[in-house]
Image (cartoon, helix red, strand yellow):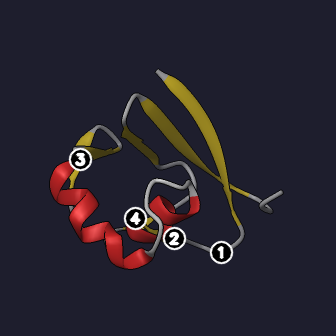
């Protein structure tokens, strides 16, 4: 499984915003459809709420990739 670091500028990001940021969906509105067709795990637990708040240290996994959220500036 591939692991990617995702630095956050803010205190948290929602799952829908993260999916858009990493290019999994073209717009935030596509998050609901994506989450109904793709199993997404947050810290090892299945998650389907696009508004779920994610903080540095959280891990989000889907499609053989794990995204580790870190505190810092986006490049």
Separation of disc 4 and disc 2 at Cα? 7 Å
Q: Is residue 7 above or below residue 68?
A: below
Where residue 53 appears, x then y in whole percent?
40, 70
Between discs 3 and 4, the one toward the N terminus: 4
Separation of disc 3 and disc 1 at Cα? 26 Å
| Contact flag, marks 3 and 1 (Cβ < 8 Å) | no
Where residue 1 appears, x then y in whole percent?
46, 20
Between discs 4 and 1, the one toward the N terminus: 1
Q: Which residue is mark 1?
A: 10
Separation of disc 2 and disc 3 at Cα? 19 Å
Determine whether, in the image, residue 64 is placed left or right of residue 13. Answer: left
Between discs 2 and 3, the one toward the N terminus: 2
| Contact flag, marks 4 and 1 (Cβ < 8 Å) | no
Determine whether, in the image, residue 43 is placed left or right of residue 10. Answer: left
Q: Is residue 27 above or below residue 18?
A: below
| Contact flag, marks 1 and 2 (Cβ < 8 Å) | yes
| Contact flag, marks 4 and 2 (Cβ < 8 Å) | no
Element on which disc 1 rests:
loop
Q: Nearer the viewer, mark 3 or mark 4?
A: 3
Q: Nearer the viewer, mark 3 or mark 1?
A: 3
Circle number at residue 15: 4
Element on which disc 4 rests:
helix
Separation of disc 4 and disc 1 at Cα? 14 Å
Separation of disc 3 and disc 4 at Cα? 13 Å
Q: Which residue is mark 3?
A: 38
Which residue sits at x=35%, y=79%?
Answer: 29
């Amino acid at each position: 499984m591939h692991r990617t670091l995702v630095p956050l500028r803010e205190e948290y990001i929602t799952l829908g915003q993260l999916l858009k940021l990493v290019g999994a969906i073209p717009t935030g509105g596509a998050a609901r459809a994506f989450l109904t067709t793709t199993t997404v795990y947050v810290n090892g637990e299945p998650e389907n709420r696009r508004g779920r708040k994610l903080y540095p240290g959280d891990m989000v996994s889907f499609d053989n990739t794990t995204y580790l959220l870190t505190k810092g500036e986006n490049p």
